Amino acid sequence: QVQLVESGGGLVQPGGTLRVSCAASGFPFTNFWMYWLRQAPGKGLEWISAINNEGSRTWYRDSVKGRFTISRDNAKNTLYLEMNGLKIEDTAVYYCARRAAMGTRGTKLRDGNTVYEFDYKGQGTQVTVAS
């Protein structure tokens, strides 16, 4: 079965750097676009970044653009999110998610006029930014 397992979260000071990872299994990782999502305390789930299956194209929501970098290692079935210049408002549980397979219905998240649909997400890893 599809499994997505995040790791690497923790406590970091404002302005700091953290890299979170997501180990994927149970499906052909190289065939799927992948997403990072997050949910801050008291707020809804939001999409923050996407990467195509080859890793050659990436997308970010405006609030993290220039600070966060999504990447993937298809040989290791692993997705990464490097976060630089962290801010207190980046505090959240971070999830990796698989773009919904063709012909299936998933959960939709909107960023502006773009809809991102995912069918699986992991259990999340907590990132806390505090001084």
Image (cartoon, rainbow, N blue to C red):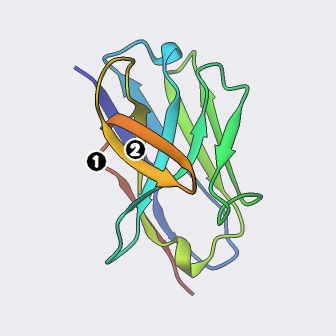
Nearest the viewer among 124 and 119 is: 119
The answer to the question of whether label 2 and label 1 lie on touching residues, with beta carbons closer than 8 A, is yes
- Label 1: which secondary element: loop
Nearest the viewer among 122 and 31 is: 31
In this rendering, the answer to whether 3 lies above or below 66 is above
Question: Which quarter of the figure has residue 39?
Answer: bottom left
Question: Which quarter of the figure has residue 118?
Answer: top left
Identify residue for label 2. Answer: 6
The spot of residue 52 in percent (x, y) is 61, 27
Q: CA distance from mark 2 to mark 1?
A: 7 Å
In this rendering, the answer to whether 86 lies above or below 70 is below
Q: Is residue 24 among the parts visible in the rendering?
A: yes
In this rendering, the answer to whether 32 lies above or below 34 is above
Q: Identify the residue at image location x=77%, y=58%.
A: 66
Tell me the amino acid under the disc marked 1: Gln
In the displayed structure, does residue 67 sit left or right of residue 103? right
First in residue order: circle 2 vs circle 1: 2
Identify residue for label 1. Answer: 123
| Mark 2 surroundings within 10 Å by alpha-carbon count, few (fewer than 14), some (14 through 19), many (20 or more) | many
